[in-house]
Image (spheres, coloured by chain):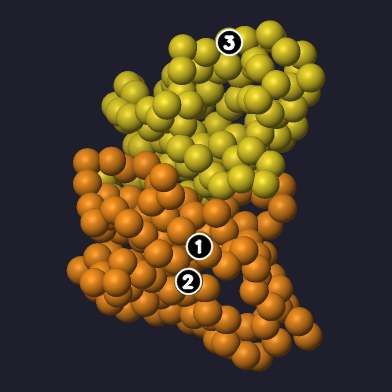
Chain colours: A yellow, B orange
């Protein structure tokens, strides 16, 4: 069964450093999302990406964040200068060709900013 | 502003009995609802969904009921099994937005 994969599974970084989180979507999926979950809180939407551009973003997704598909398969989330409050689980989710479809989530990357 | 609410943080059920997890929403633009199951340190796993044009969807032991007038949905698991123990998230989407809005989750414990 096709799966969304994410790397790394864990990342520890110093405050102010840049991190790149990677996602490999299910092949033939066209809609891509990043969500995060701070410990003890609910899953929150960050950004959606379709047709090589951002389609929606939340208030959380400020200028420190960016997304891209560098090689047509990977989908990345970059945090330019990490803050302590960026510590969270980051989940990638993807779905197919229709706007309203079930989103399938990856296993997540646990980011810890020290 | 919580658009999707799961008011029970936890639920404990005996194995073999029915588990009922509830979810309320406030945004009348929501037209597609999903339930996800999540284990610690893993991603949410899709369980079942329902479109607003339906009031019930069933898949094996899992049934989701939607009451649009009350803006309420519920997930029924019957019979409950110890392996069902996890956190269950209700999520919704609708209007022009494709992103999911999640509830805070309900931790289900199924005791043998």
Residue under the point 36% across and 59% down:
B25
The residue to which callout 2 is attached is B22
Q: Badge 1, how many Cα within 10 Å: few under 14, some, many 20+?
A: many
- The answer to whether mark 2 and mark 1 are in CB contact below 8 A is yes
The residue to which callout 1 is attached is B6
User: How many discs appear?
Assistant: 3
Find the distance from the CA under tag 3 to the CA under tag 2.
39 Å
Find the distance from the CA under tag 2 to the CA under tag 1.
6 Å
Residue B72 x %, y % = 36, 70
| Chain ID at mark 2 | B
Q: Is residue A95 visible?
A: yes
Residue under the point 53% across and 59% down:
B89
Q: Are marks 3 and 1 on the same chain?
A: no
SS class, disc 3: loop
SS class, disc 1: loop
| Chain ID at mark 3 | A
Left or right: B40 with respect to B80? right
């Amino acid at each position: 069964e096709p799966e969304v994969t994410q790397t790394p599974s864990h990342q520890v970084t110093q405050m102010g450093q840049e991190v790149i989180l990677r996602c490999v979507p299910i092949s033939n999926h066209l809609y891509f999302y990043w969500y995060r979950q701070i410990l003890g809180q609910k899953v929150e939407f960050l950004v959606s990406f379709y047709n090589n551009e951002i389609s929606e973003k939340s208030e959380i997704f400020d200028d420190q964040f960016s997304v891209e598909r560098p090689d047509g398969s990977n989908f990345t989330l970059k945090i330019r200068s990490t803050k302590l409050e960026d510590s969270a689980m980051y989940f990638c989710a993807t779905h197919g060709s229709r706007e309203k479809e079930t989103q399938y989530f990856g296993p997540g990357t646990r980011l810890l900013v020290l | 502003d919580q658009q999707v609410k799961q008011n029970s943080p936890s639920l404990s059920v005996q194995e073999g009995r029915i588990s009922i997890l509830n979810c309320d929403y406030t945004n009348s633009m929501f037209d597609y609802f999903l339930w996800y199951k999540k284990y610690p340190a893993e991603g949410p796993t899709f369980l079942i969904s329902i479109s607003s044009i339906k009031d019930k969807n069933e898949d094996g032991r899992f049934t989701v009921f939607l009451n649009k007038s009350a803006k309420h949905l519920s997930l029924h698991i019957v019979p409950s099994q110890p392996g069902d123990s996890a956190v269950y998230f209700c999520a919704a989407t609708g209007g022009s937005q494709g992103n999911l809005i999640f509830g805070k989750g309900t931790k289900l414990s199924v005791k043998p």
